Amino acid sequence: MNKILLNFYIIVAFFSNILFLSNLDLSFKDKVNKALNIKYIILWFTIIFHIYSLYKTNKYINKYILPAILCLNLVGLLLISLCNNELTFIHILSMIGLVYLLVTFNYKDFEVIDGFLLKENKANKLWIYLYILFIIVWYLSSSYIFVRDKIICTLLILYPLLFPIKEFFFHRVLALSVAYFVLNINKIKI
């Protein structure tokens, strides 16, 4: 992995975490806000564990925690859809796809070492490509996401494909961190 890109990711992730904590609304005024906050919290734990995994080898993080967080991410998307009453036909199809991904998920295919997938096989490649497809359909069919944000989210899911597939989730997570920082820098609460 390119050291300049890695350092950029880490610096932006650090500032994104500070921005996230300053903007965190723990009041949970409505169900959608609560579901989004849970999704963001999952994202920030993923960022922290991924960066930690780059520098220290921890059997539990690499083998169990990061794959489990990947599943929690999918559950978070389903929770957001259910809280937002997203019941269009296409959105329901994307939710069925997310459930399919959860059912077919094998954590052994998603063990991580040094921040990247340990194995690169047909099973996890197919799963990742289906993940990309279902997440894009989920974003595009979500009624509460603005068109500009749909485009950004779609590009963020496709961007990691510029790198080897075993680096997909690392780049995905840290690209989301960069996007969060860029989209929310003007909303900082001091």
Image: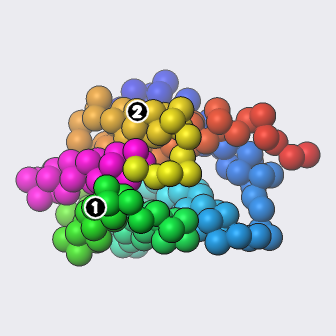
- Residue under circle 2? 155
Disc with the residue nearer the chain's start (2 vs 1):
1
Q: Is residue 69 above or below residue 150?
A: below
* The N terminus: image quadrant: top left
Residue 8: which numbered mark, if any? Answer: none
Give the residue at x 55% y 65%: 84
Residue range in magenta is 119-140
Q: Main secondary structure of the magenta part?
A: helix
| Mark 2 or 1: the one toward you | 1
| Dot 2 amino acid type | Leu
Horizontal and vertical percent position of residue 40: 59, 58
Quarter where residue 101 is shown: bottom left
Is residue 99 something one can see in this rendering?
yes
Q: Is residue 94 above or below residue 147?
A: below
Give the residue at x 56% y 51%: 144
Quarter where residue 45 is shown: bottom right
Nearer-the-camera pick, 77 or 82: 82
- Residue under circle 1? 93
How would you rate the neighbour count of disc 1 (Cα within 10 Å): few for under 14, some for 14-19, many for 20 or more?
A: some
Question: Magenta includes 130?
Answer: yes
Horizontal and vertical percent position of residue 170: 40, 46
Q: Look at the numbered disc 1 and give the secondary structure of its residue.
A: helix
Horizontal and vertical percent position of residue 180: 61, 42
Horizontal and vertical percent position of residue 70: 38, 63
